[in-house]
Amino acid sequence: MAKIIANFFISVDGVVESPDQWHFPYWNDEMGAVVEAGMRSAAAMLMGRKLYDEWSAYWTTTDADQDIARSFNEIRKYVVSNTLEKADWTNTTVISGDVAAGVRELKERIDGDIQMSGSATTVRWLLADGLLDELNLLVHPIAVGHGQRLFEDTPTHPLKLVRSETFRTGVLNLTYVPATA
């Protein structure tokens, strides 16, 4: 059975939107190793409609010789959406209709990790429906002050910290799992 693992670059004030605008000064070999390990463990990727639109437009037009572009273009991708009718990005399947049942079936069918990078709305939905297995946060020592936050207008979700590490840049690498009731 697969685990769904969500990964975010996040500011201390909870912002996850547009990390390309604030996270690069904190990138180092420690963070690179964590991101690379997550990509290596991925049997598939899961995303929401908005991230699919952004990434499919970007990764299909960037230099395909880059390892990261090749990885994103070749991996199996699943998009949770009841509005996306067709996915043209290679190896992409749309999960629609009873999305929760579709995601449960996906978890049963896939061996390995189903990685997510971004898709805050989808992660909130997965957490609320008991489908998220792990939440990895790379907490950057910066208050961005504006932008979408990971948890906006959500019910309470108890989490359990299972791993933590501090990078030389001050970034915290935190791993949470949903706390059992």
Image (tube, helix red, strand yellow):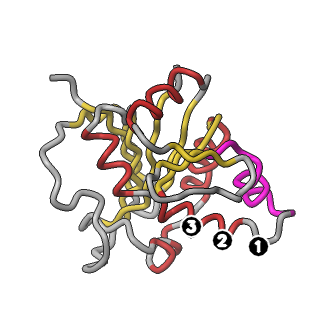
**Looking at the image, residue 129 lies above or below residue 16:** above
Q: Do the residues labelled 3 and 2 touch (CB within 8 Å)?
A: yes
Cα gap from disc 1 to disc 2, whole angstroms: 7 Å
Q: Which of 77 and 162 is in front in this view?
A: 77
Amino acid at dot 3 = Asp
For label 3, the SS is helix
Q: Residue 57 carries which label?
A: 2
Q: Are marks 1 and 2 in contact (CB under 8 Å)?
A: yes
Q: Quadrant of residue 133?
A: top left
| x then y, percent, for residue 51 | 51, 62
Q: Are marks 1 and 3 in contact (CB under 8 Å)?
A: no
Which residue matches tag 1? 61
Q: Residue at x 65, y 64 (%)?
A: 56
The stretch in magenta equals 65-77
Q: Which of 174 and 103 is in front in this view?
A: 103
**Looking at the image, residue 10 lies above or below residue 57:** above
Q: Is residue 102 magenta?
A: no
Which residue matches tag 3? 53
Q: Which residue is drawn at 57% across and 47% down?
A: 94
| x then y, percent, for residue 31 | 54, 55
Of callouts 1 and 3, the N-terminal one: 3
Cα gap from disc 3 to disc 2, whole angstroms: 6 Å
Quick one: label 3, few (<14), some, or many (20+) residues within 10 Å? some
Amino acid at dot 1 = Thr
Total numbered labels placed on residues in the image: 3
Q: Which mark is residue 165?
A: none
Front tag of 1 and 3: 3
For label 2, the SS is helix
Amino acid at dot 2 = Ala
Q: Is the magenta stretch mostly helix, strand or loop?
A: helix
Q: Which residue is drawn at 64% across and 56% down?
A: 87
